[in-house]
Image (cartoon, coloured by chain):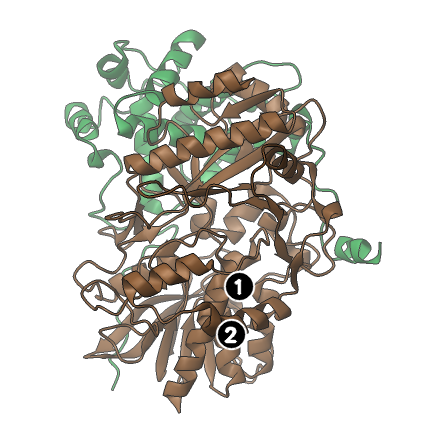
């Protein structure tokens, strides 16, 4: 039998020796930005909460700062998640804390113009005023503060200096850290516990208020009767192998709060037979990312220092018919760099050899705002595995290309000797006149490396049940006691790194859930 | 009253299930090749696995790993300071990466490797009826490039899969870090190290 007396600590898969039945007020599925926040807030409001997390529970001292072990341990699909055609590498966390446990700490509030768009186009109830107290609470608990200038590493400095010289908007970001040593390994799990991720904040808060938190517990299905979710069935995984132990956790809650992230939440609904005429899993947005690598005469050491401390939103609004983008830096470690760089053989080696002098800057496209822009789709393969497809429309290729041009200009302005694209045959830019070469490069799936670190949508909120999955209050249109409290409820992408937006929205929604429980 | 939970229909790493939609069947070309090959043309029965690959392996056969090692040797050709992939025991490292994938993806990867190696594929796709492993370095580079730049999206996807597994295995190995100027993590890791940083 599970150690039912255990309080104030996470129950791991190895602690569960028999099938378990739980009957809490709320079952929260997923312990990332949305789920952990909702669990903490609902516990604070007096609700009895069970929180299920598929990934493992790790301590800072578990982090070995090796790519070979960190990605399989801390990311979805053991670090191998991608779109079905492998065109877009998907970086998405899978652990207690979800993606917040691998997040590069950039903390922006939701832009007002995005909230306005959601109100106008989708009937959202979210206003800057409604969210302000929630952002305040999140930022206070997560110690969100502007990065001091001395924390800007040479990789981010390239963006700060280059964009400044070009006269573009650029600023230091706010980060959710306390006692940060600027090691540079946020993406591999902070080894000193300085990042104030959900596993260091909301999960302990929920535990302290009596929530029961299961790690290695994979929700596989919701049992539904008419308009009510009766039961959540979870498989217990062995923390050592990540395979099912045969034990199960059946949770029979009054309310279910789904927070598996924008890929796994739609997948869980689909596995449970809830597809709402194809709307579940539709309109998935990724902030698709292209990168340009600047090679500098000076050492950059892009692997060390705070991974992100600077951002430019100069091109966030490029006018009607155009997809905007924003610019940030990305930390570079050898494995991910090697998988991302283009070129075969000697060309690839030559670029790798220059890694200490390389700065990697990224353009994140702001998808979901053009008329008729549907983004990607989450679906199930016949065997139940999740599949993500993201067809890239011409307007998005244009934005990725223009984003790369902007990044090339930043690098050149910051003093780069050469700038490389991530095409299979890398475009090399040494001066402004070379930038037009990007127009002739092949902008096609799997001919240029693309990423996503921000997954949004798939269970879009909206007033109209014909066009959305959840209500503006984030309750499923078709089910009375099920809510979606993660990034999948967003009807478009955000135009900023989503972490604290998802937290603030989840906290706002949790207050509604708590009221409904009374 | 809630119904009893039904057995899971979800595949997790290591599980097997029939009736899956394969990577190759998604493309017309893949389907045609599989039909033409009937399993025989796409086999690695003529592939010679060099001695010293290591093992035992969990996903790939020694012959399949011989193909992947040959790919890695071309992705990281001879260069001062860069260890030879073979010398790193890269076969076992690539096998370990594939072992992290679910069973269906592992099957796809194995079919991909056999297709890439196959003389039939070489003939149909590149006009050269040779095993990849029995081709000259120039011919091998030619096949890798042809797949990377193919107009057929499925071949580009396949090339990307081969490339990712080989490059991930090579550059995640600490023995290769000196070649790329990486000194490794700035602190010793583990509980003792974390205390050291906090105190410092």
The picture quadrant where one finds residue B164 is top left
Is A117 located above or below residue A296 in the figure?
A: below
Q: Residues within 10 Å of mark 2 (few under 14, many from 20)?
A: many
| Discs 1 and 2 carry the same chain letter | yes
**Closer-to-camera residue (A169/A397):** A169
Q: Residues within 10 Å of mark 1 (few under 14, many from 20)?
A: many
Q: Chain of mark 2?
A: A
The picture quadrant where one finds residue A293 is top right
| Colour chain A is painted in | brown
Q: What residue did someone put label 2 on?
A: A213
Do the residues under discs 1 and 2 have CB atoms within 8 angstroms?
A: yes
Instruction: Determine whether, in the image, residue B6 is placed left or right of residue A77.
Output: left
Q: Residue A424 at what x, y percent from top left? A: 42, 23
Instruction: Determine whether, in the image, residue A141 is placed left or right of residue B167.
Output: right
In the picture, the disc for residue A368 is: none
Nearer the N terminus, badge 1 or badge 2?
1
Q: What's the distance in space between the residues labelled 1 and 2, CA to CA?
A: 9 Å
How many marks are shown on the rendered structure?
2
Q: Residue B136 at what x, y percent from top left? A: 42, 7
Q: Residue A97 at what x, y percent from top left? A: 53, 63
Residue drawn at the location 30% of the way across and 26% of the way down: B155
Disc 2 on helix, strand or loop?
strand
Q: What residue did someone put label 1 on?
A: A96
């Amino acid at each position: 039998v599970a150690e039912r007396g255990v309080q104030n600590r996470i129950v791991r898969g190895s602690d569960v020796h028999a099938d378990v039945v739980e009957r809490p007020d709320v079952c929260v599925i997923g312990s990332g930005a949305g789920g952990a926040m909702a669990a903490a807030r609902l516990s604070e409001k007096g609700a009895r909460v069970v929180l299920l997390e598929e990934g493992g529970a790790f301590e800072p001292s578990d982090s070995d700062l090796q790519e070979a072990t960190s990605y399989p341990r801390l990311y979805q699909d053991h670090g191998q998640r991608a779109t079905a055609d492998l065109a877009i590498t998907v970086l998405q966390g899978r652990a207690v804390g979800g993606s917040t446990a691998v997040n590069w700490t950039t903390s922006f509030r939701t832009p007002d113009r995005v909230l306005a768009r959601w109100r106008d186009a989708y009937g959202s109830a979210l206003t800057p005023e409604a969210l302000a107290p929630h952002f305040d609470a999140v930022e206070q608990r997560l110690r969100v503060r502007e990065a001091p200038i001395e924390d800007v590493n040479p990789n981010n400095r390239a963006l700060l200096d280059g964009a400044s010289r070009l006269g573009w908007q650029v600023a230091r970001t706010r980060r959710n850290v306390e006692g940060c040593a600027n090691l540079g390994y946020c993406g591999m799990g902070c080894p000193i516990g300085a990042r104030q991720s959900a596993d260091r904040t909301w999960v302990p808060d929920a535990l302290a208020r009596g929530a029961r938190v299961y790690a290695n517990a994979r929700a596989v299905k919701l049992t539904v009767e008419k308009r009510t979710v009766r039961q959540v069935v979870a498989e217990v995984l062995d923390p050592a192998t990540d395979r099912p132990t045969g034990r199960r956790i059946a949770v029979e809650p009054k309310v279910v709060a789904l927070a598996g992230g924008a890929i796994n939440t739609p997948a869980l609904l689909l596995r449970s037979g809830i597809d709402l005429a194809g709307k579940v899993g539709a309109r998935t947005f990724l902030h698709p990312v292209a990168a340009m690598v600047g090679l500098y005469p000076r050492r950059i050491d892009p692997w060390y220092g705070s991974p992100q401390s600077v951002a430019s939103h100069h091109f966030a609004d490029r006018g009607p018919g155009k997809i905007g983008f924003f610019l940030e830096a990305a930390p570079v470690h050898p494995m991910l760099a090697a998988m991302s760089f283009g070129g075969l053989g000697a060309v690839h080696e030559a670029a790798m050899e220059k890694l200490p002098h390389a700065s990697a800057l990224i353009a994140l496209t702001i998808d979901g705002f053009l008329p008729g822009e549907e983004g990607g789709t989450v679906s199930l393969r016949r065997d139940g595995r999740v599949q993500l497809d993201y067809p890239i429309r011409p307007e998005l290729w244009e934005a990725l290309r223009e984003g790369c041009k902007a990044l090339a200009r930043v690098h050149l302005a910051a003093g780069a000797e050469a700038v490389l694209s991530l095409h299979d045959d890398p475009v090399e830019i040494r001066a402004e006149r070379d930038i037009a070469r990007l127009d002739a490069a092949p902008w096609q799936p799997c001919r240029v490396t693309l990423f996503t670190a921000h997954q949004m949508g798939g269970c879009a909120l909206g007033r109209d049940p014909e066009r959305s999955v959840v209500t503006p209050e984030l309750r499923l249109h078709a089910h009375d006691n099920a809510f979606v409290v993660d990034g999948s409820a967003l009807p478009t992408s955000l135009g900023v790194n989503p972490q604290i937006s998802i937290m603030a929205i989840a906290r706002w929604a949790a207050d509604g859930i708590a009221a409904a429980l009374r | 009253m809630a119904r009893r939970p039904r057995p899971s229909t979800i595949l997790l790493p290591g599980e097997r299930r029939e009736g899956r939609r394969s990577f190759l069947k998604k493309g017309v070309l893949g389907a045609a090749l599989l039909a033409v090959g009937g399993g025989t043309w796409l086999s690695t029965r003529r592939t010679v696995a060099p001695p010293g690959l290591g093992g035992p392996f969990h996903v790939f056969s020694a012959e399949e790993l011989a193909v992947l090692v040959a790919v890695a040797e071309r992705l990281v050709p001879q260069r001062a300071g860069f260890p030879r992939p073979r010398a790193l025991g890269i076969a076992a490292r690539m096998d370990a990466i594939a072992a992290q994938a679910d069973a269906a993806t592992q099957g796809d990867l194995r079919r991909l490797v056999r297709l890439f190696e196959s003389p039939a594929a070489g003939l149909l796709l590149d006009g050269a009826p040779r095993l990849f492993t029995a081709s000259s370095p120039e011919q091998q580079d030619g096949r890798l490039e042809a797949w990377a730049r193919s107009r057929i999206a499925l071949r580009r996807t396949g090339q990307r899969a081969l490339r990712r597994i080989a490059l991930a295995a090579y550059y995640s190995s600490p023995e290769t870090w000196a070649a790329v100027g990486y000194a490794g993590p700035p602190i010793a890791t583990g509980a003792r190290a974390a205390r050291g940083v906090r105190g410092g």
